[in-house]
Image (cartoon, rainbow, N blue to C red):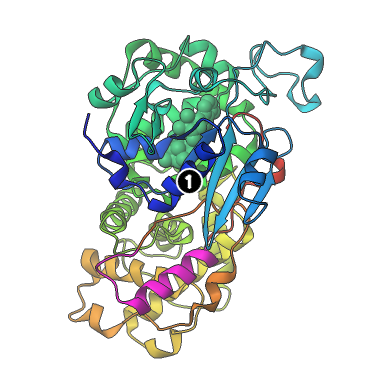
């Protein structure tokens, strides 16, 4: 185990955990951030778990910059600028549900499906209510100490194994979103499934139809913001899961258009990981849709775009909505994605680029165009001719609820102005399909 893992963590998070600890509450860093620091990747956001109740957490921070969210699964959002840290109270695994307690719309759901999971518990309980061993590793940055209650988290992470905690078939029935989360780990990290977990995943694919649409839309958003979007979609397709999750995309997955989308996403992912591009949701949506829009508008080769005509926006919008059906992207995300697509024509033709400076979606569209230039356009000096616009920092105040933070920290490859633009665009891009107050159980 490497020493001084805490050096890889944002000092602000260490301070947050330190304050809860100093107030007498056992507290850990949990979830994806622990996975990432142990794998030497940069965490994209931080989840904290504590013995303090949501009200106690607020008191520790003197009610400042905190918001209690969620109706059933209540947790605290600690807000710093555009970033939100989720602080949840240790929970325990729910008892078997009484059939009478099920929401009416879920009467046909699997027998063991869980709808309520809000009972507080100990840190050990909290580890065992989590989905996979690699997701149940706790890290205490104050004492630089790993707590691995399942005893398998760290070794599974080292070996790259996805293993459910407890009986896989039961855990997937309890919450079918875990099927998606298991395959996502395969795509994002190149992990393999432990055999029993793999068998249960394959036998449980169809259960996803019982998951709530708002949770699935939230998972889709997270996948599209992820720098491994293409790899995750490929894993979904390989496992036969995409058919149930995004059937329209599955139908066209083995086409030259999808190959082109995956190439765009791969180049974008490399640049997000290098800190050069933003993890923009609408740009990812536009990259998936572009080749299909081109085909629909008469292009035989990806990269050729289309000739502008009045009403093209509506046609582009239909392509976007169709590909992600039945999941619903927010109106804002769809509009920004369409905007990104429309702007490709302007970039390719190099017309009046200076007049685009204040357009919403311009940085994302520019990043998109840079990648298209590498793949197909090959316009010399393209990057120099479309610099990023300089904007004021004001737009970053528009933080929207539901945003769970993004790429953090400065980055050596960008000027101050670029960082400001990226910050503003990321804030504007953060409309989340998940509605906090309706957050479904089991998070
Ligand atoms: P990401 O890097 O995509 O955020 P993550 O594992 O942190 O991945 P989150 O949705 O942020 O995913 O969840 C944080 C943690 O909460 C997970 O690591 C896991 O321990 C727990 N968790 C999330 N969803 C479930 C679930 N459906 N069932 C059990 N535990 C879950
Ligand atoms: Mg997380």
Which residue is at the front of the view, 140 or 279? Answer: 140
Residue at horizontal 57%, vertical 66%? 335
Q: Describe residue 385's horizontal placement relative to residue 47 as left or right.
A: left
The quadrant where residue 202 appears: top left
Label 1 beta carbon less than 8 Å to ligand 1: yes
Looking at the image, residue 308 lies above or below residue 296: below
Total label count?
1
Q: Is residue 427 magenta?
A: yes
Looking at the image, residue 229 lies above or below residue 390: above
Magenta residues span 410-429
The quadrant where residue 288 appears: bottom left
Which residue is at the front of the view, 288 or 180? Answer: 180
The dominant secondary structure in magenta is: helix
Judge whether residue 205 can be spotted in this image.
yes
Mark 1 crowd level (few <14, some 14–19, many ≥20, 10 Å Cα): some
Residue at horizontal 38%, vertical 51%? 10
Residue at horizontal 48%, vertical 82%? 392
> The N terminus lies in which quarter of the figure?
top left
Residue 106 location (% of width, % of height): 73, 24
Looking at the image, residue 326 lies above or below residue 353: above
Secondary element at tag 1: helix
Judge whether residue 250 can be spotted in this image.
no
Which residue is at the front of the view, 400 or 356? Answer: 400
The residue to which callout 1 is attached is 222
In this view, the residue farthest toward the left is 380
Residue 25 location (% of width, % of height): 55, 32
Residue 12 location (% of width, % of height): 43, 53
Residue at horizontal 58%, vertical 29%? 51
């Amino acid at each position: 185990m490497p020493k001084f893992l805490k050096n890889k963590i944002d000092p602000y998070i260490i301070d947050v955990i330190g304050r809860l600890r100093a107030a007498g509450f056992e507290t850990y860093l949990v979830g994806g951030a622990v996975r990432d620091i142990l794998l030497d990747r940069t965490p994209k956001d931080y989840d904290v778990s504590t013995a303090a109740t949501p009200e106690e957490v607020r008191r520790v921070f003197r009610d400042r910059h905190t918001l209690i969210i969620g109706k059933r699964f209540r947790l605290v959002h600690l807000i710093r600028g555009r970033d939100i840290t989720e602080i949840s109270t240790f929970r325990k695994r729910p008892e078997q549900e009484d059939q009478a307690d099920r929401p009416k719309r879920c009467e046909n759901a699997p027998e063991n499906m869980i709808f309520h999971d809000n009972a507080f518990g100990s840190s050990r309980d909290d580890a065992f209510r989590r989905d996979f061993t690699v997701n149940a590793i706790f890290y205490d940055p104050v004492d630089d100490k790993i707590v691995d209650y399942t005893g398998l988290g760290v070794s599974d992470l080292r070996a790259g194994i996805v293993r459910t905690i407890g009986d896989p078939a039961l855990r997937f029935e309890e919450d079918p979103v875990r099927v998606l989360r298991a395959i996502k780990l395969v795509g994002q990290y190149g992990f393999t499934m432990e055999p029993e977990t793999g068998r249960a995943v394959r036998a449980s694919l169809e259960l996803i139809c019982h998951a709530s649409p708002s949770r699935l839309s939230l998972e889709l958003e997270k996948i599209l913001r992820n720098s491994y979007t293409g790899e995750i979609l490929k894993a979904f397709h390989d496992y036969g899961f995409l058919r149930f999750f995004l059937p329209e995309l599955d139908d066209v997955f083995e086409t030259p258009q999808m190959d082109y989308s995956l190439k765009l996403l791969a180049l974008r992912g490399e640049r997000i990981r290098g800190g050069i591009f933003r993890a923009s949701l609408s740009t990812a949506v536009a990259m998936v849709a572009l080749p299909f829009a081109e085909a629909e508008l008469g292009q035989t080769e990806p990269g050729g775009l289309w000739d502008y005509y009045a009403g093209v926006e509506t046609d582009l919008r239909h392509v976007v909505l169709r590909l992600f059906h039945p999941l619903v992207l927010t109106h804002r995300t769809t509009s920004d994605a369409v905007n990104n697509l429309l702007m490709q024509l302007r970039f390719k033709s190099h017309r009046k680029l200076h007049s685009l400076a204040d357009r919403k979606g311009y940085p994302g569209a520019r990043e998109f165009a840079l990648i298209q230039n590498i793949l197909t356009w090959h316009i010399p000096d393209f990057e120099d001719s479309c610099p990023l616009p300089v904007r004021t920092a004001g737009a970053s105040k528009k933080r929207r609820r539901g945003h769970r933070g993004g790429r953090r920290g400065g980055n050596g490859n960008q000027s101050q102005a670029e960082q400001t633009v990226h910050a503003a665009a990321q804030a504007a891009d953060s409309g989340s399909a998940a509605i906090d107050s309706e957050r479904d159980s089991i998070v």
